[in-house]
Image: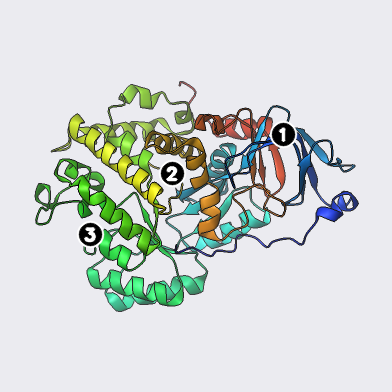
Amino acid sequence: MHMMKIELSKIALPVIGMVIASAAIADTTVIVNVNVVPMASEVVLGQQTVVVVDDKIAQIGHVDSVPVPKGSTVVDGTDRYLMPGLAEMHAHVTSTDPDRVDRMSTLFVANGITTIRGMLGRASHLKLREQFESGAVFGPRLVTSGPSLNGRSVSGAADASRQVREQQAAGYDFVKIHPGLSGDEFSALAKTANEIGMPFAGHVPASAGVRQALQYKMTTIDHLDGYFAALLPAGNSGSGGFGGFFDVMLAGALDANEIPGIVAATVAAGTWNVPTEVLIEQLIDDTPLAELERRPEMRFISAATVQRWLAEKEAQSNERGLNPEVAALAIDLRRRLILELHKAGAGLLLGSDAPQTFNVPGFSTHRELDALVAAGLTPFEALRIGTVAVATFLGSNGGTIATGKDADLILLDANPLENVRNSERIHGVMLRGRWIPATELKARLERHVVQTNQ
C-alpha cells in the first residue's frame, strides 16, 4: 500500500533500563494495574503497569513485577482500559486565532483524538504544527495539507505541477484536491506528486473519475468520492449527470455487481479511503431535526450555526430525486463498499470531516466509529482503523501500546472491544506523555460551551 511517510516525532533512545534512574530528571507517569488494549492484536492484557518517561512508553509489565519510580505521577488503572489515542483523518483547522485553536484542540483531545489530518491548510498551519509538537500550544499532532488545488486555484497543467512542487518545498505533508480540476491538470498534479514523492488526497475530479485516480495511485480518496459514479452501468450518466451530494441520488441506478471490481482496483492501487460515512448518512437519513438539535455536543456550537446545519439537512431532504427509499439505498450501498474494501484489505482510515454539518470535532469521530460498526466491522476493526492503520499510513511511532512507542493514550472506564461506544467513556488522556485527567478535560470543555439550553 502507498503510505504517507511523515515524521511526526523523533524516536527516543531505549529507556527501559533507565526508568528508575531517570525519574528525578524526567517526567514520569505510571498507570498502575490497568487492562491494556494494545491494538496490535485483539487481546486485553490484564493487571499491567505502564511506565511513561517523557513522551515515550518506557516499560510495560505485570503489576507485581514493575516498580513505581519514586517521584512519578501515579494513575490508578484498576478496572480501566488503556488504548492508543485515536486519529481524525479528515479534520479542518478553521482558524489560528489562539482561542479558536484552544477550542478545537480541547474538543479533539477531550474525546481521545491525539492526531488530526488537516484537509485545508495554509502557511500558518506549518507554524501551528510545530507549536503543537513542541507543546508550546495545547493540541493534537497535526498533519497538514497546503491550500487546496481546485478549479479556481489552478490554471493549467504546468501550474498544477508547479504548485505541487512548491507545496512540498514549503513543508506541507500532502496536497489536497478539491473539485474542478481538468483532466490535464489532475494528470499533471498526480504525475508530479508521484515523481517527487508528495502524497495527494481528497476529492476525485469528475474529469478523471475514480478509476483514473486509482491508476495514478491517489494516496487517499475521501468521502468515497467517485465510487458511486464508477458503479453506474456503461452509458448511464445517472439523472442527466446530476447525482447530488456525493452522488447519493444515483443509488437506484447503480450496479452493485461492480463493487468487487472497483474494490480490487483500489487494493491494486494501494489507495486508502477515508469514508467520512457519518457526514453523508446524517445529512440524508431520517433522523429527526429535533434529535440532531438536541445532541449533547451541540452545546459547543453557536445557535446560528446549528440552525444553518438544520436548514442544510432540510434542503437536502427536499432535493429533487431524493426520497427516503433512495437515501436508505445509498446508505446501504456505501456501507457495503466500506465492508468490502475492508474485507479485501484496502486501507481504511478513521475520519468524519470535522467541523462540518452536524460534525462537532472529536464527538463526530466517535459517531464515525458507530457508522463503521453499523457497516459490519467489529469494534476492534473499527478502532484499528483509527490507531494501527493510521500509524502504518503515516509511518509514525504510534498506533499501538508497546515499549518505545509514543505515549498518546486513552484511559477508559469500560472495554472498547466489547462495545465501540465505550471509547467515549474517557477517564483521562495522555498526550505526548502528559497525563490529562477527566477533571481537567471537563474544565477545558466547560470554557468552550456556547449554548446551555440543550
Q: Residue at x 47, y 41 (%)?
A: 382
Quarter of the figure with residue 133: bottom right
The residue that disc 3 covers is 206
Q: Is tag 1's residue or tag 3's residue first in the polypeptide sequence?
A: 1
The residue that disc 2 covers is 354
> What is the crowding at mark 1: few (fewer than 14 residues within 10 Å), some, or many (at least 20)?
many
Element at label 3: loop
> What is the crowding at mark 3: few (fewer than 14 residues within 10 Å), some, or many (at least 20)?
some
Disc 3 residue type? Ala
- Mark 2–mark 1 Cα distance, whole angstroms, equals 32 Å
Disc 2 residue type? Ala
Q: Compared to 59, does 417 lie above or below?
A: above
Q: Residue at x 28, y 51 (%)?
A: 260
Left or right position of 49 against 363: right
Q: Is tag 2's residue or tag 1's residue first in the polypeptide sequence?
A: 1
Q: Residue at x 46, y 46 (%)?
A: 350
Query: Do the residues under discs 1 and 3 have CB atoms within 8 angstroms?
Result: no
Q: Residue at x 48, y 63 (%)?
A: 3
Tell me the tag on residue 34. Answer: 1
Left or right position of 148 against 126: left
Q: Compared to 98, does 143 lie above or below?
A: below
Q: Nearer the viewer, mark 2 or mark 3?
A: 3
Disc 1 residue type? Val
